[in-house]
Image (cartoon, rainbow, N blue to C red):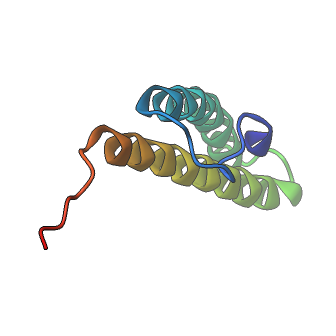
Amino acid sequence: MASKLCSCDHLPASAQEALACAQKWDNAVQRMMKTYAGAKFAINAGRGGANAAQRFEDRAEVLHQAMAHRHHCQLMAEQLRKRPLMLKA
């Protein structure tokens, strides 16, 4: 689900493009945190049977990937906002 939002394989052309990508990932993280919390609640409540732990681990992994993508896009936006480094001869 998370990998369908935006592909971070390309370099954004502008800081605005990188910020838009980060916003998409931020929205995805918010949604995934809810599913992660639901899976954790199912484990704590003793519901979900044997598959509950596996679902929780899967949700945690997807959430972690989405947070990493969001962080990557935020770093790219910061780098694109900075002036290029000019070396003196």
- Looking at the picture, tell me which residue is in the foreground, 58 or 12: 12
Q: Is residue 38 left or right of residue 69?
A: right
- Looking at the picture, tell me which residue is in the foreground, 43 or 35: 35
Q: Residue furthest front?
A: 89
The image shows residue 24 at horizontal and vertical percentages of 60, 28
- Looking at the picture, tell me which residue is in the foreground, 56 or 82: 82
Q: Residue at x 63, y 28 (%)?
A: 31
The image shows residue 25 at horizontal and vertical percentages of 58, 35
- Looking at the picture, tell me which residue is in the foreground, 57 or 76: 76
For the N terminus, give its image quadrant.
top right
Q: Is residue 73 above or below residue 34?
A: below
The picture quadrant where one finds residue 78 is top left
Q: Is residue 75 left or right of residue 23?
A: left
Q: Residue at x 64, y 36 (%)?
A: 32
The image shows residue 66 at horizontal and vertical percentages of 61, 46
Q: Residue furthest bottom?
A: 89
Tell how many labels: 0
Q: Residue at x 53, y 26 (%)?
A: 20
Q: Residue at x 73, y 49 (%)?
A: 46
The image shows residue 3 at horizontal and vertical percentages of 76, 45
For the C terminus, give its image quadrant.
bottom left
